[in-house]
Image (cartoon, rainbow, N blue to C red):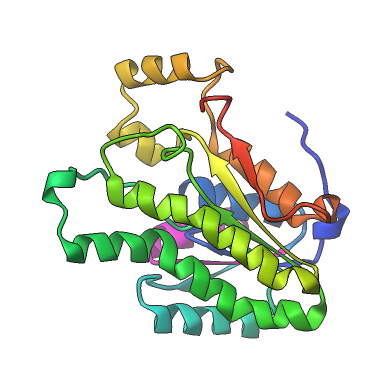
Amino acid sequence: MSYAIYPSLEGRTVFVSGGATGIGAEIVKGFAAQGAKVGFLDFDADASSALVKATEGNVTHEFCDLRDIDDLRAAIGRLKAALGPAEVLVNNAARDDRHAWTDVEPDYWDERFAVNLRHMFFAIQAVAPDMVAAGKGSIINMGSNSWWEAGGGFPAYTSAKSAVHGLTRTMARDLGDHRIRVNTVVPGWVMTERQKKLWANPEALEKHRDRQCLPDLIEPRHVARMVLFLASDDAEMCTANNYMVEAGSI
């Protein structure tokens, strides 16, 4: 397939969290193919090294446990030192681990929010001052259609992901005067290797296809293409909104 090239992304500095695998890796590769300067954060050292090698060293990786905000801030600082201030931030990192509501304890709830929401705000806080100084920027938060669908089986995850909508809306208002755009990309069920391994059995896939308007399963590249658009100047008047990539499944 042939996809759009965005001239405005060439040379642009992009930071991506959770960039080593799945949707994040496709986002990293997509920006690299556009000629952007890409740095990504991840604590999967092996997958990160493999991605750097696959992109022929055209991307930069910093090890980071996003649950540790001091570690997050330090890693972003190292990316800034290596690549320059972020002009685009993609808050992608998340984990949709299943859990029964009857088993959840406060520590687990807090850890799920640390994994799926808290780091997004503190990453924004870390990069936004440079965007304010530049008078422009694009921040893209990764949501999920799981809560829109009233999906069950992971209440801490869906609660955190629903809060991404509020974070996007309020930060778009707080940063908009500086021409910084803040949006949410909302994927449906994306066929990453993790999903295929853990949950994408034939029965579940057949049921999910019935929910979608389109018959094809969603691949990571479909989500990455929306992220690239929102990061580009083609989306210069797009902010404070959800951009769905869910094949009409809501």
Taking the spot 75% from the left edge, 47% from the top edge, the residue there is 229
In the image, residue 160 lies in the stretch drawn in magenta: no
Q: Which quadrant would residue 60 be assigned to in this image?
A: bottom right
Residue 57 % position (x, y): 61, 64
Nearer the observer, 7 or 236? 236
Q: Is residue 85 left or right of residue 237?
A: left
Q: Which quadrant would residue 107 be assigned to in this image?
A: bottom left
Q: Is residue 49 above or below residue 178?
A: above
Residue 75 % position (x, y): 50, 79
Q: Give, as a single range, the part of the protein colored magenta.
A: 37-59
Quadrant of the frame with the N terminus: top right
Taking the spot 82% from the left edge, 76% from the top edge, the residue there is 135
Q: Is residue 202 visible?
A: yes
Q: Is residue 53 above or below residue 224?
A: below
Residue 146 % position (x, y): 42, 38
Nearer the observer, 109 or 138? 109
Residue 196 % position (x, y): 36, 32
